[in-house]
Image (cartoon, rainbow, N blue to C red):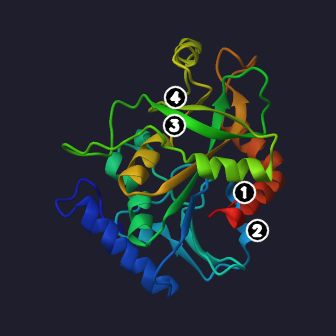
């Protein structure tokens, strides 16, 4: 059963250890090599990894919360690739706007680290600032700007952030599809979409992609020593660039239309990760 972050029993590190042990028991796998967070539009990729050895309801794991977002599975799944590597699909993502606290947002990342994961793939559906981008286009995250006014780090925890998103892993993605563009991801708190003025601000700061996830997870991953690959599906042009109002239905529709291509792209990239 999930433990609330408001509970006196809540301790981020101990909960991550507890959840990792529950996953080991459910999957029969001691160590996973790669973890993948499937964001909006990327859910179909799981089918390309074959039959899961186990599918776990996230609500039954310590520290996890059932997803409130349409398009997220709310489960964790364990697969074994043909090359023998074990991967963990994290289909249960908490967002900062749910007011569960930043520790709940990064909990899946910490659990993955406790399972021995060394490589984390973070995917999301996001708004594009570059006017040349089209809905349904995947792009590589090269860097991020954290505008959430919070961090998963506590105390004097000084983590180098000069290469949050591994150059090595980005090169692997480009080897699969050399046409992939890249950009800087800007995380806002949400849940409201960004205003045109906020999008102009993000662009002036050097941002290319706007969304409500990923940056905090990447920070926690770097603290844990994981290599990170970030991929965004451009589901819509951002406010002020898009000629029409933004909606979550638009996000889901762009994901459905791109699902087959995204699934093949992601599964090929994962199969080549070092």
Residue 199 position within the rendered picture, expressed as x and y whole percent measured from the top left? 57, 18
Q: Which one is earlier in the sequence, the residue at label 1 or at label 4? A: 4
Q: Single out the mark in the foreground, 3 or 1.
A: 1
Dot 2 surroundings within 10 Å: few (below 14), some, or many (20 or more)? some
Residue 27 position within the rendered picture, expressed as x and y whole percent measured from the top left? 52, 83
Q: Which one is earlier in the sequence, the residue at label 4 or at label 2? A: 2
Residue at screen point 23% across, 60% down:
10
Label 1 with label 2: CB-CB less than 8 Å: yes
Label 1 – label 2 distance at C-alpha = 9 Å
Label 1 – label 4 distance at C-alpha = 28 Å
Q: Which residue is mark 1?
A: 266
Front-lying residue, 30 or 254: 30
Q: Is residue 20 left or right of residue 89?
A: left
Residue at screen point 27% across, 63% down:
13
Residue 60 position within the rendered picture, expressed as x and y whole percent measured from the top left? 42, 72
Q: Single out the mark in the foreground, 4 or 2.
A: 2
Label 4 – label 2 distance at C-alpha = 33 Å
């Amino acid at each position: 059963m999930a433990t609330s972050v408001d509970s006196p029993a809540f301790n981020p590190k101990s909960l991550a250890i507890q959840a990792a042990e529950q996953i080991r028991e459910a999957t029969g796998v001691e160590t996973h090599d790669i973890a993948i967070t499937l964001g909006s539009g990327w859910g179909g990729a799981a089918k390309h990894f074959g039959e899961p050895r186990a599918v776990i309801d996230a609500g039954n794991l310590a520290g996890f919360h059932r997803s409130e977002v349409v398009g997220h599975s709310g489960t964790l799944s364990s697969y074994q690739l043909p090359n023998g590597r074990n991967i963990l699909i994290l289909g249960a993502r908490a967002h900062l706007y749910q007011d569960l606290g930043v520790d709940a947002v990064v909990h899946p990342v910490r659990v993955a680290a406790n399972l021995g994961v060394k490589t984390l793939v973070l995917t999301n559906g996001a708004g594009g600032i570059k006017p040349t981008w089209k809905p349904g286009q995947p792009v590589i995250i090269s860097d991020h700007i954290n505008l959430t006014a919070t961090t998963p780090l506590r105390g004097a925890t000084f983590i180098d952030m000069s290469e949050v998103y591994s150059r090595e892993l980005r090169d692997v993605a480009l080897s699969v599809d050399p046409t992939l563009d890249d950009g800087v991801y800007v995380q806002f708190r949400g849940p409201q979409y960004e205003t045109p003025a906020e999008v102009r601000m993000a662009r002036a700061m050097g941002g290319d992609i706007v969304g409500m996830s990923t940056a905090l997870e990447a920070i926690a991953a770097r603290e844990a020593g994981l290599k990170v690959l970030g991929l965004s599906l451009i589901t819509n042009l951002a406010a002020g660039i898009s000629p029409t109002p933004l909606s979550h239905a638009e996000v889901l529709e762009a994901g459905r239309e791109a699902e087959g291509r995204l699934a093949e792209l992601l599964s090929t990239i994962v199969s080549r990760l070092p």
